[in-house]
Amino acid sequence: RRSRVTVRARREFNATSAAAAASRTPEERVLRALASPFGATDFPVRMTTFAYQDENAAKVRIVIATEVGPSDGASGNLMLAYELLDANGRSVTSQPRRETLTPLTTDNGPVFQHVAALVVDPGTYTLKLAAVDERGRQASVERSVKAWQMADMPLAVSDLTVADPLFGPNAKAAQTVQARLTSPRLLAYFELYSNQADYLTDAGVRVDVASE
């Protein structure tokens, strides 16, 4: 027993009935999962981001790669929604969209991949993704996103994408949460930017690959 300690409790709690929860549409479910301060973990979902200079050079293009699974009964038909919070807490929430994710066979079972993009001002953000599958199961994940200044700089570098050579010469098209290689070779893709016309004329690039 401690002295000078006061314990307070709420006089009542409100709980949603099972019938009310079951009647929610997929759109309502995904928005509730997005707004919840707690993560939803009914099935595994992972997310990563890649930052590039946008066509509007003052902006940053954030590519969002998502991977669902592997898990029993995983489905590539999902309701997805994103929320982006800036450093001041201002929120931009995407409209829920029904998406059919691309399946990929892995050693641990099938996974489903999805790629989306947002254009933002340079800054630090919190990105949250919520997903609802056909069975009503929910999953969510969030991460910090840094969209650094790439315009009006003598030298700026985008994020690095690593991909399997099966994707062909354009590794940028292979933005995934995890690079899975089928051979000892890999493709590496990144972009260099400069506000000086001849700054990168004699630039050289070297990519080092370290073993575990």
Image (spheres, grey):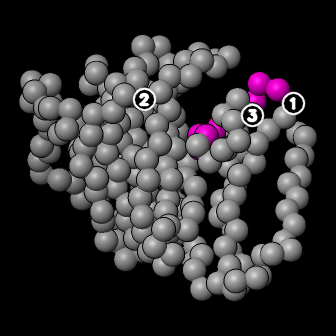
Quadrant assignment, res 118:
bottom left
> Any magenta on residue 21?
no
- Counting residues from the start of the chain, the first of labels 1 and 3 encountered is 3
Confirm whether residue 33 shows in the render: no
**Does 171 sit left or right of 40 as displayed?**
right
How many numbered dots are placed on residues in this image? 3
Name the residue that disc number 2 marks. 101
Tell me whether the residue at label 2 lies in contact with that at label 1, contact meaning CB atoms closer than 8 angstroms. no
Give the residue drawn at x 42%, y 69%. Answer: 120
Residue 93 as seen in the image, left or right of residue 1: left
Q: Amino acid at mark 1?
A: Pro
In this rendering, the answer to whether 96 lies above or below 20 is below
Relative to 119, does residue 24 appear above or below in the rendering?
above
Is residue 198 shown above or below 80? below
What residue would you read off at disc 3?
165
Q: Provide residue 195's location: percent of width, then percent of height.
A: 64, 84
Q: Which residue is mark 1?
A: 184
Q: Main secondary structure of the magenta part?
A: loop
Whole-percent x, y for residue 27 in the image: 19, 38
Mark earlier in primary sequence (2, 1): 2
At label 2, the amino acid type is Leu
Which image quarter: residue 206?
A: bottom right
Mark 2 or mark 3: name the one nearer the start of the chain.
2
Q: Secondary structure at mark 3?
A: helix
Q: Nearer the viewer, mark 2 or mark 3?
A: 3
Which residues are drawn in magenta?
A: 174-184
Q: Nearer the viewer, residue 66 or 203?
A: 203
The amino acid sitting under disc 3 is Pro
Contact between marks 1 and 3 (CB within 8 A): the answer is no
Q: Count neighbours of disc 1 (C-alpha within 10 A) and say few if under 14, some if 14 to 19, many if 20 or more.
A: few
